[in-house]
Amino acid sequence: MSELAPRAGTPLVTLGYRGAEPVGFLSAPVFGVRCELRRIGVAPEHRGRGWGRDLLSHAIARAAAYGCDRIELEVAADNTPARALYARLGFQQVGRRPRYYAGEGRSQPVDAILMDCATCSKTS
């Protein structure tokens, strides 16, 4: 599993539970002073309840404890809920990859939005 053993860097994996029930996960390896949010997911029946925010806030705090001063991520332009969450936690758009996401049930390719947060540790 590349998420648990990245080629370089320190794995940062967070699991969210409600009692014994897993509700979400996050993977964000740390590379020196940079952390790269690779995956975050919340079970459909638990979405809209703050689990994504809590997972990401926890990862931001852990990344800061590892000495990170920046967290980077990429998100599909049509993923409005995720983009809103990232913006609320201090991420800003820093780039765009046109027509990056194709397939995956999409009728048209979708741009990838590159986001970065240099001050996330102050917002969590």
Image (spheres, rainbow, N blue to C red):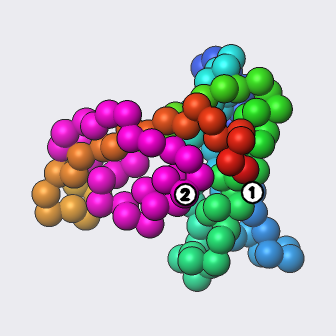
Q: What stretch is highlighted in magenta?
A: 75-101
Q: Which amino acid does label 2 sit on?
A: Arg
| Residue 61 in the figure: left or right of residue 9 | right
Above/below status of 98 relative to 83: above
Determine the residue positioned at 32% across, 33% down. 95
Residue 15's tag is 1
> Which label was assigned to residue 118?
none
Label 2 element class: helix
**Left or right, residue 35 beside residue 58:** left
Please say if 39 is above or below 54.
above
Question: Picture coordinates of residue 79 (x, y %)?
Answer: 37, 61
Secondary element at image label 1: strand
| Mark 1: amino acid | Leu
Residue 72 location (% of width, % of height): 52, 34
Against 18, is 62 above or below? above
Coordinates of residue 58 in the picture (x, y in percent): 76, 50
- Where on the picture, by quarter, is residue 27? top right
| Residue lying at 77% horizontally and 42% vertically, measured from the top left | 61
Q: Residue at x 55, y 37 (%)?
A: 117
Name the residue tied to disc 2.
88
**Neighbour class for label 1 at 10 Å: few (<14), some, many (≥20)?**
some
| Numbered-mark total | 2
Position of 14 relative to 42 (above/below): above
Which of the pair 9/49 is nearer the observer? 49
